[in-house]
Amino acid sequence: MKPRSISLLALGLVCLAASAASAHAFLDHANPAVGSSLPKSPQVIRIWFTQGIEPAFSTIEVTDGSGRRIDDDDSQVDAADRTQLFETLKPLPPGTYKVHWRVISIDTHPTEGSFSFEIVP
Amino acid sequence: MDFSAEYATGLIRGLHAIGTLSLFGILVFRLTVACPLLPQAPSAAIDRFEARLDRLTWLSLALATAMEAAWLGAEAVSMSGLPPVQALSGKVLGKVLFLTTFGHTWITRLTLEGMLALLILARKGRPEFHWPLDAAGAVTAGGILTALAFVSHGAALEGAERPVAIGIQAAHLLAAGAWLGALLPLFLLLEAVEGGPKYRGPALGGMACQRFSGLGILCVAILAASALGNSLLFVGGFAGLFSTFYGLLVLVKLVLFLTLIGFASWNRFHWTPLLFLPSRKNRSMVCAGLRRSIALETGVGILLVGVAGLLSSTPPGEHSQPWWPFSFRLSGAALELPAVYNEILIAGIGAAIGLFIMAGGIFSRRLRRALIPAGLVVTAFFVATPLQLLSVTAYPTSFRRSPTGFTVQSVAAGERLFAANCVACHGPLGKGDGIRAKSLPIPPADLTAEHVRDHPVGDLFWWITNGMDDGIMPPFGGSIPESGRWNLIDYVRAWNDAVLLAAPPDGDENAPKDGGEKAIPAPGFRYACPDGSQQDLSAPERKAVVALIFPRPGAGEAVPAPVRRRLEEAGILPVLGPGAGPAGEESCVAEAKDLERAYALYAPRARDAGTLPDQVFLIDRDGWLRGRQDFVPGALTRLLDRARAIEARRLAPPGGGGHMHGH
């Protein structure tokens, strides 16, 4: 076998022909934290994701115990950190709230999820 | 999540890649093979070739642009989440095109595709301009592939990794295009030159193949290197490769890639030399055989690109937990034993000698037949030893991570579950001395032993769920829900860590043991600060050492203002546990639930009482629990010194399946 063919085969063995992994932005952590109990109403809800996300199509929706939406639909991506999505909230009465998030990662994969938190003074 | 929609997008991306890779390959082939060689061919052959290659070029361009349109539509539906009728409106399409990274690259690509069409039209019938127009076309087509790299996984990374990942992906695409995209043009050239009426001239077919091979080898090298780069960035280690569906697709792609290299090598070293035979009849038979091989190779190449397209859209499956398919895994834990370490060192030297022998065989013609097999045997023998020594038993759940985030709630829940389910055998302190222990043929494990730390949480999860030693430890998968089992693991780990942190009887804080401090995670909790913000202990943006203070109840203000100022000046954030003084306290206060119960584990004297008067825990900014002391507001020196030492020395996370914060 000629040296070149050996080096060809060796190269082939060395490489792991991996294509880009699917990049889905998942929830890394949130503030208020997933499933947490707060003494007073949070002013901002902020979610950190595992990947950078597209501002134009990433949203947070907060609903109260009866399923009524109580946020202003003005979620934004942090200018300094593309993995953070946040939304300001009006003062909320005590109760359980559900947060539904839907984001698109920069490489166009949509993900969504939800969690809840409660306000118990 | 609609998986079928994602797979449809993957199919579109795959077809789009076939079109764009083909365009780049055609133009590179023209520049490197066709333009230099074709003038030496008879004019009939040239015309035949140009006509067919033009048709192929327009087909590729049509495929690419058709898929651009389809991709835009698919993304409009996917991003907006609306049904197709509403998603394909001007408003949504405009938003996608102008407000997303995907949209910006789409506009770039479409513009470049238009420019390419103009260049192809311009070159027709103008042979004197072929070279510059083809060069411009190659750059344009290369630009289209580079634009694709900006919507690859690397583009979603943050920081310094992002440009590196995009560069690697661009190199990968360009190399794939120059190699795979040039296969069909080579096929057409061979057909035109060798398949036509006889002529006497240089063996153009053979020369074309040789030129193509040279470029092909370079492309394979770039593909291998960029694939390795991508793997290091994204695959997630061998666990990810073997235990997820995505990893399976990567392995399929690897097999296809090796197949392609096999074809290429066969073409280069078997067929190509035969194209230089003097006999015309033999040459045309060889040519037919070679064209068949190239056609097969193209088919495998198309399959591979299709798999790559699917791969780029494969969802990992609800944040999938890996299911390890083998009964063993490699672990570096055994290296801590000197005997094992020495054996592995010797094996390493032996393997290196074996590789050296093999290298000698490559460079020496005479001894090749003897040296290469001998070197292979020697290397294999010396590689087998470390594999055996470093193999440990593994279970399907070995590489799972805990979903609890190691919070105080989880640890406290685990303690309650332990008391209800485990003390009968493992004993109240987990030492394996429970009431039922003596009657068991195999004694229950001492859960305070350091060896427990060598097992990843996935192993513990398997044993709790399925039992051990044929049911001597019964399975709890049916009686304790999955979240409860993870709570139990958090408790066992916390208690095991606590034994490690155990203070000498005089209550002084732990001095570093020999070998340095081990990184012990502090159970997570939330705290609220006077400015209204709510913080989480594990939040990465926290920049101070946290002093978790459990004040003596009824002792007035736990942290007087001057004390707090001194602490804050030293970069310490005081956080009060429950039992804090009167309202108006200006410090951050931690959430009460389960906090004291969880932290009491780390203070042996307080464990039974469940309260921790006058104790302070120091938690560094990485979330490691670094010490526990008596809290004396009047005498802060020791506390401040310890905090300074903590800040000065950051700890590395423990290897081999320790706790994982966050997800």
Image (spheres, coloured by chain):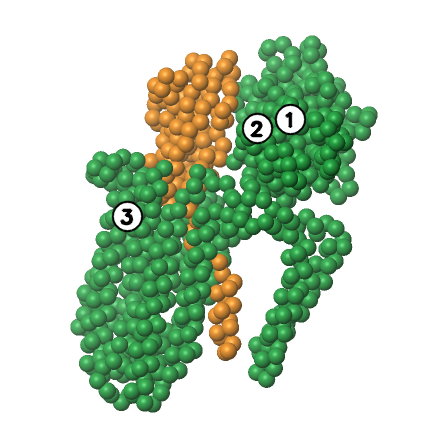
Chain colours: A orange, B green
Horizontal and vertical percent for residue B502?
A: 75, 30
Position above or below: B308 against B372: above
Position above or below: B404 against B172: above
Q: Residues within 10 Å of mark 3 (few under 14, many from 20)?
A: many
Q: Chain of mark 3?
A: B
Q: Which residue occupies the extreme right position in the image?
A: B506
Tag 3 residue? B71
Q: Chain of mark 1?
A: B
Q: Quadrant of the N terminus of chain B?
A: top left
- Among the two numbered marks 1 and 2 on one chain, the one whose residue lies closer to the N terminus: 1
Q: Is residue B32 left or right of residue B255?
A: left
- Among the two numbered marks 3 and 2 on one chain, the one whose residue lies closer to the N terminus: 3
Q: Chain of mark 2?
A: B
User: Which quadrant of the figure has residue B611?
Assistant: top right
Q: CA distance from mark 1 to mark 2?
A: 9 Å
Horizontal and vertical percent for residue B468?
A: 64, 38
Q: Residue at x 42, y 46 (%)?
A: A22
Q: CA distance from mark 1 to mark 3?
A: 55 Å
Instruction: Confirm or deny contact between disc 3 and disc 2 (CB under 8 A).
Output: no
Q: CA distance from mark 3 to mark 2?
A: 47 Å
Work out whether residue B643 can be spotted: no
Tag 2 residue? B480
Element carrying mark 2:
loop
| Residue nearest the viewer, comparing B323 with B310 | B323
Q: Residue at x 28, y 44 (%)?
A: B74
Position above or below: B655 against B402: below
Q: Is residue B445 left or right of residue A19?
A: right
Tag 1 residue? B421
Q: Nearer the viewer, mark 3 or mark 2?
A: 2
Q: Amino acid at mark 1?
A: Asn
